[in-house]
Amino acid sequence: MGRKSRYSREFRERAVRMVFDHQPEYGTRWAAMGSIAAKMGGTAETLRKWVRPSEQDQGIREGLSGAERERREALERENREHNRANEIRRQASADFAQAELDRRGK
């Protein structure tokens, strides 16, 4: 439910590929990103945010790949749902127990 990206997925993938392909022509990766971003009408920082996950997916950089990240988020979401359901059950159990105690006292 995130907002729609200004750049298409194909555009981002092409820009990332260009960084990997043209990095040897520049002194540093940051220099390559700055030059490519300027030519493509973006900023080096935006391009860096696209390159990092790509490096993780390829195993170049430490961290979770895109599939692993999605799986973790799904598990965390499921865990939150279970915790909410358990809290509702605990509260209902406490309410029923209190109602039973109140009923017996009369």
Image (spheres, grey):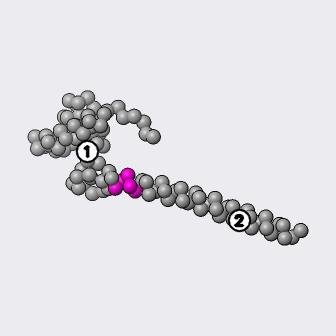
The x and y percentages for residue 73 are 42, 53
Identified at 30% across, 43% down, the residue is: 49
Identified at 71% across, 65% down, the residue is: 94
Label 1 neighbourhood size at 10 Å, few (<14), some (14-19), many (20+)? many
Identified at 43% across, 54% down, the residue is: 74
Front-lying residue, 58 or 89: 89
Look at the numbered disc 1 and give the secondary structure of its residue: helix
- Residue placed under numbered mark 2 in the picture: 94
In the picture, the disc for residue 77 is none
* 100 to the left or right of 8: right
Look at the numbered disc 2 and give the secondary structure of its residue: helix
Residue 34 in view in this figure: no
- Residue placed under numbered mark 1 in the picture: 51
The N terminus, quarter of image: top left
Q: Is residue 14 magenta?
A: no
Residue type at tag 2: Ala
Identified at 20% across, 29% down, the residue is: 39
* 40 to the left or right of 99: left
Magenta stretch bounds:
68-72
For residue 24, which quarter of the picture? top left
